[in-house]
Image (cartoon, grey):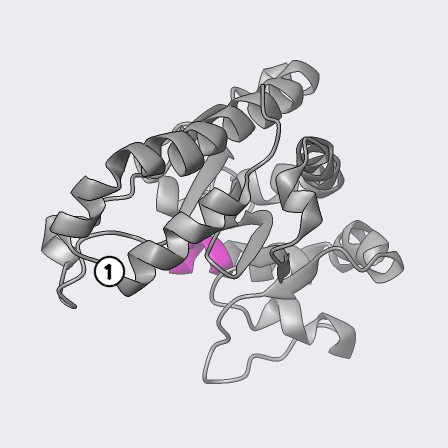
Amino acid sequence: MFTGFTSKTIDFMWGLRLNNEKAWFEANKENFIQDFQTPMKALAKEVYEKLASKYSKHGFAHKVSRIYKDARRVRDGEPYRCNMWFTIEKPSDEWTATPVFWFELSPDSWRYGLGYYQAKPITMAKFRARIDQHTQAFEKLIAPLKKQDEFALDGDDYKRIKTAPSPHLADWYNKKSLILVHQQDNGEELFSSKLVERLVSGYKFLMPFYDYFITLDSDPDL
C-alpha cells in the first residue's frame, strides 16, 4: 500500500542530479530502492487497481520507468534519470503513439495527466478531420475543462498555423501532440496516501478524453 513519498525520496533525487555517476549511484542504490523505486511502484499499482476495477473493459496495464537511461541515449555523460514515472495504458507495440495516463516525479515538482508521448502525424490528421466533421461533439467534450483548473492543454504546436473550424478550438487544432497535464511543486500531498485518490479522481475526469483519443486510429470514417 502506498503511504506517501518521503523527504528521503526528494533528497535522493537531488543527490543523483548533482552526482549523476555510477560510483555515487551504486553507493546509494539501497536508498534508491527503498525511498524512490518501492513507493513509486506501490503508487502505480494502487492507482492502476482502482482505475482498472472501474474500467475493466479498457484492458489497461501499468508500467514503471527505469532509472537507467538507454545506453544509446547517454550523450550527456549522465547514465541515470533524476526522475521516474509510471503509465497506465492499453498495451501496444507503439506505446509512444497511443494515449496514456501518467504520473511523473522530479526533484522539484510532480505532474500527471493524459496524452501522447509522440502522436503520429496521421493520428493528428484524423483528430482534425473528426473536429471538422463533428465540431459540436468535440466542443461538448472539452466544455468541462473550462469549469476546472486541475488540467491544462499542453503540447508542441505546428509552426504553420492551421485554420480551425472555430477560433476557440485553434489551440487544439494546432497541436502536433496532445497533453492534458497538471503540474505543481513538491509539497505535503506528495508525502501522503491522499495522492492516490488525487490521481484516480483526475484520471476519471480525463477518461472521456482517453475514449475519444484511443478511437482515432481505428475510425474508418476518417
- Residue 90 visible to the viewer: no
Foreground pick, 130 / 103: 103
Relative to 203, say whether 41 is above or below: above
Q: Residue at x 58, y 66 (%)?
A: 154
- Whole-percent x, y for residue 133 in the image: 68, 57
Instruction: Kindly indicate the quadrant of the structure image that contains residue 78.
Output: bottom left
Residue 21: in magenta span: no
User: Farthest residue in the bottom direction?
Assistant: 160
Segment colored magenta: 119-124
Foreground pick, 27 / 107: 27
- Whole-percent x, y for residue 52 in the image: 61, 19
Q: Residue at x 75, y 54 (%)?
A: 138
Relative to 185, say whether 26 is above or below: above
Locate residue 67 relative to residue 12 in the image: left or right. Answer: left
Locate residue 66 relative to residue 199 in the image: left or right. Answer: left
On the image, numbered disc 1 is attached to which residue? 19
| Prevailing secondary structure class for the magenta stretch in the rendered image | helix
Relative to 199, say whether 2 is above or below: above
Locate residue 156 relative to residue 166 in the image: left or right. Answer: left
User: Farthest residue in the right direction?
Assistant: 147
- Whole-percent x, y for residue 176 in the image: 47, 67
Foreground pick, 12 / 48: 12
Instruction: Kindly indicate the quadrant of the structure image that contains residue 5.
Output: top right
- Whole-percent x, y for residue 149 in the image: 80, 60
Relative to 143, say whether 203 is above or below: above
- Residue 128 visible to the viewer: yes
Q: Give the amino acid type for the residue marked by disc 1 in the picture.
A: Asn
